[in-house]
Amino acid sequence: MIIKVCGMRDADNIRAVEALGIDLMGFIFWPNSSRYVGAKPSYLPETCQRVGVFVDASVQDILAAVQDFRLDIVQLHGHETPEMVAALKEKAAVRVVKAMAVNGPEDLAQTAAYEDVCDAFLFDTKGRLPGGNGQQFDWNVLRFYTGRLPFLLSGGIGPEDAQRVRAFDVPGCIGIDLNSRFEKAPGLKDVEALRTFIETIKQ
């Protein structure tokens, strides 16, 4: 199972979370986020892949961040069109994950337009913000997903959900995205809580 920890920006915290053996580390480039990575950290992870999270940013701004942070993956959380995603992939050698806000099965239909231009989806809780709301949706909704692209499960996953994650068995789910429920403060992760959670789900 792929483990992504998102919303990082403190160099020491980045080192400590990276040492847990995670697969993906996310950096949020949306200025309105309390986890906005406004300045490049003095240390960036080397043993896990770097993910840049954007909300309705221009292709030019995304490309600049890809180069500056040496991003492996771009995660789009806004109203980006399939045409915009195609243009981005044409100009940058990165994989693209499109986040989809989910409440009910009807929300899964929006994935169809992106299947030919994205590499994976991230299903997040439909809420006030484009992401990081700290709330869960009914994971059973994803049993109605019939798309051909894999996806990450996101949205309010917390330390108490380890056993639920272990038991979650839906075709296409390749991993989880962890963020606000594992924080001591916005952008500062509770390393021991993450360690315990990761050890539990990997048992």
Image (cartoon, rainbow, N blue to C red):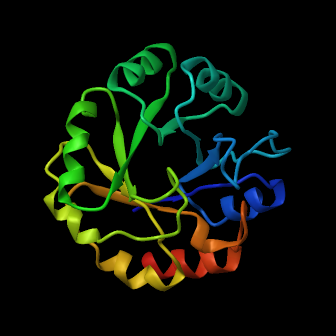
* Left or right side of 137 for 200: right
Q: Classify residue 187 by image quadrant.
A: bottom right
Q: Quadrant of the N terminus?
A: bottom left
> Split into 4 quadrants, where in the image is the C terminus?
bottom left
Residue 143 x %, y %: 17, 64
Task: Kindly tell me whether residue 149 is visible in this rendering.
Answer: yes
Q: Is residue 200 above or below residue 46?
A: below
Residue 170 seen: no
Looking at the rendering, which quadrant does residue 103 occupy?
bottom left
- The quadrant in which residue 57 appears is top right
Which residue is situated farthest in the right direction here? 42
Q: Position of residue 106 (x, y in %)?
A: 18, 53
Q: What residue do we see at 25% from left, 41% from top?
A: 111
Q: How many marks?
A: 0
Residue at image point 47% right, 38% down = 76
What percent of the width, then of the height, locates residue 133?
Answer: 53, 63
Q: Give the left or right position of residue 151, taking residue 56 as reference.
A: left
Q: Residue at x 74, y 45 (%)?
A: 37
Image: 26 above or below 91: below
Residue depicted at 44% across the width and 32% down the height: 95
Q: Residue furthest front?
A: 128
Nearest the eye: 170 or 82: 82
Image coordinates of residue 176 in percent, x first then y, are 43, 62
